[in-house]
Amino acid sequence: MKILVCSTEYPPYGSGIGNVVSNVVEQLTKRGVECTICSPEGPDIKLGNQNLIKKCGIIGLLYFWYQVSRVVKDNSYDAVWLHNPYFIFNNPFPRCLITMHSTYYGLSHHRVGNTFFLRMYYQIISILELYCLKTISKTTVFTGVGESVCEELEKIGVGRDQLICVPNGVDIQYFKPINDKNLLREKLKIPQDDIILLSVGRLTPAKQPQTLIKVFSLLEKRMSNLTLCIAGTGELLDSIKQMTLEAGLKKVIFLGQIDHNSGLPDLYAASDYFIMTSIYEGGMPPLTLSEAMASGLPCIVSDITSLECVKIAKCGIVNNFKNIEEACDEILEYINMDHSEKIQNGRKYVEENLDWSSISENYFKALKRTMSLSD
């Protein structure tokens, strides 16, 4: 099988989408599938502009997909795998598998954003998204990285018979529990004797990092040996740092962007708890949550559909972060409990359901189905 993969993200740039693409491509290559990667950074076909995507959002995305439609020809490929495509004109690929990692409809529906203008932006882009998806053939196969994304696509107008749910995966060899945290903490320069609460991910409105800081401001007052480590960058980084300073918080460490393969596994393993205060996530589970579970971290997450695997796996607690004081009380009570069983539960769930080898098998079948529909 010979496929073309088109994505606006690919390592070392990007985050969630690039992570999925690179891991699945690696597994497909092991199966003998020949993969050609097209992204703003290549490595095989370089189109679009990464800086334009970072600075201008949807404009940069539309520019990339416009170039793909004009430059790339699929005559020599058995199938084309597209990630969150936005074709203003007709989709040029008759044999394509489309993977949606999130939708602007979802962002708009969940009222993500703390300003009127940002919510209006998501609403306007969701209309554009609807228009782009309507240009795609009714026989095209779609995969969503969670049931919530599949439900959003169905509401947009994609037929249920076109949809396959393929969750995000995790490399269980990279991400795993480690007994000796002290050496890792010394290496990472984080407190040796404190309880480490870890947040990983881009600081965006959907992640609600303001809520995380508000919760921790109460936790820090009531628990002197608790440190919050925040790994990641994003458009809200500066405002969150300023919020931390204004709140007078002494035990918040901003780690910046951590290398996914060489740094993140150690960071998870060196921590004690994983926390996620998101209002919306496309992945079910999100990549960072699956990595935390694989690393044996008890998880503290928002009460939203995409994070329900914490309940299913019995590896943590869910919180309604709308009430900051109640959330703080629940977290403090949880931290004082024994979590040895929850460490095992999370790891077991990931091993049985989210290893990239099994996830890539689902994508391989979806690509085969794409090829058969075009015959």
Image (cartoon, grey):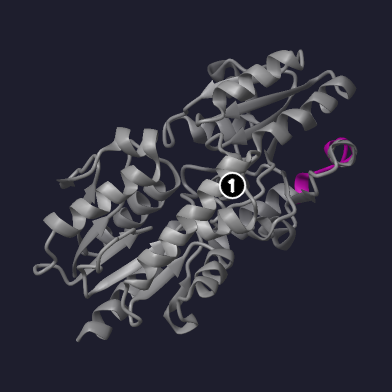
- Identify the residue at image location x=22%, y=64%: 33
Does 275 sit above or below residue 245? below
Residue 275: percent from the left, percent from the top?
Answer: 69, 39
- Identify the residue at image location x=53%, y=60%: 105
**Residue in front for this viewpoint, 64 or 141:** 64
Residue 9 visible from this viewpoint: no
Residue 69: percent from the left, percent from the top?
Answer: 19, 59
Question: What is the span of residues highlighted in magenta in the rendered image?
Answer: 332-341
Does residue 337 show up magenta in the picture? yes
Prevailing SS of the magenta stretch = helix
Q: Which residue is mark 1?
A: 119
The image quarter containing residue 364 is bottom left
The image quarter containing residue 180 is top right
Residue 257: percent from the left, percent from the top?
Answer: 47, 27
Does 114 sit above or below residue 110? above
- Identify the residue at image location x=85%, y=36%: 328
* Outermost left residue: 76
- Identify the residue at image location x=34%, y=59%: 85
**Residue in front for this viewpoint, 127 or 151:** 127
Does residue 84 show up magenta in the picture? no
Quarter that holds the N terminus: bottom left
